Amino acid sequence: MKLIKYILKYKKTFFLLAIAILVASCVEEIPLESEGFEEAIVIEGSISNELKQHEIKLSRVYAIDSTGPSALSGADIRVIGNREFIFQESEPGVYVSRDSFAAQPGVNYQLQISANGEEYESTPMQLSGSSSIGVLQANRIDYSGENGVAITLNNQSTNESANYYRYEYVETFKFNSNYFKVNDLILVDGEPVEVPKQKEEYTCYQTNKSQEIILSNTNSLSEDSVNDLLIKFIPSDSPSLSNRYSLLVKQYVISREAYTYYEILEELSGLDNVFTQSQPGFLAGNISNINNPEEKVIGYFDISSVSTKRIYFDYEDFYDPESIRPRFVPYASCEASLPSTATLIAQLEQDIVRWSSTTPSGAFMVVPTRCVDCTRFGSNVKPEFWED
């Protein structure tokens, strides 16, 4: 995912550059062409000490004038370790191990891929020690001139080889729509009819995976510990803080070589200026074409030990419970209206309004759907892990 984001980022950059040239010329249209474009295979995946079915993704980088990454199907993928693990294609470009397995200490693992008549393999890799997440903390702070809640991590390594770390997270938060409604309006034989509400639309949950690269290393420290590492900062005006929030953090102990690879990838993905002195180039990993070492292969295959920890907190833990909570839709955009019957029918057909109240005369007051239907922004199904 990080590799695809990097490619997408530079597609946009070069597109904007081309547009700038086009506007500056004001003479003739300059078509976006891929002159000199060089294809490269993209391999995404790692193996961990988690007992599960592991996943490898294959695709190809794409030209500026194409629509997006191209999934690479029909490949033969296996990981050779203490035995052979076969991967099967579950969807275009996505390969899942046929059996569940967990990487074992002291065992070399090597990724082998056969695709489009070419043979690829990684260098043999081993687990790089282990380390558990000690404490996750949430505190209200001012960060870069903005108030919000920061989630930080501390750990203490018990293994001298556990010096390099990569982090991912999954955030899940509970939120409410702006208003609670008890009834719905539906069309029966083309006429609006008031009925009891059809589904839960007041309380919902949204889940998002991390997209950034989060790294830490203790190689230069006297103690093998990570202290006050910022994992996530949530601005105070974010709807994710409005009710109850949870963050699941995954810590990967990785090799020094993998750390260096991700560090360079992070630096390249942070280049916002196409004219920067540090121009992005090809980022080589540890996977190569056996018969054609000159072919460009993007990706890194690593073996990681994983530790996870979850934290919960409520809005009231950091903010006045009587204050106006952040919402997906501003309250100013949620005023009720009293449309004519013809207008109301058209609005219901397009699902852009919902019932608000009924006047003594029997007319229907309505509000925009997004103000009362939380499923526009999440799911009304409580996650299995959720704790209130």
Image (cartoon, rainbow, N blue to C red):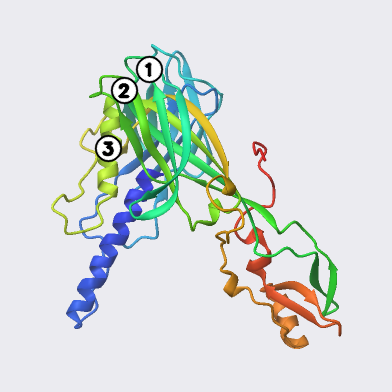
What residue appears at the point 47 percent right and 28 percent down from the top-left corner? 135
Closer to viewer: mark 2 or mark 3: 2
Amino acid type at circle 1 is Gly
Sequence-first tag of 1 and 2:
1
- Residue 327, visible in the rendered structure: yes
Q: Which residue is mark 1?
A: 129
Q: Secondary structure at mark 2?
A: loop
Amino acid type at circle 2 is Asn
Q: Which residue is mark 2?
A: 163
Per the rendering, the mark at residue 263 is: 3
Sequence-first tag of 1 and 3:
1
Residue 239 locus on image (x, y percent): 54, 56
Whether the residues at callouts 1 and 2 have beta carbons within 8 Å, the answer is yes
What residue appears at the point 27 percent right and 60 percent down from the top-left corner? 13
Q: Is residue 322 above or below residue 285?
A: below
Residue 148 locus on image (x, y percent): 45, 51
Residue 198 locus on image (x, y percent): 80, 61
Which one is nearer the viewer's eye here, 62 or 303? 303
Sequence-first tag of 2 and 3:
2
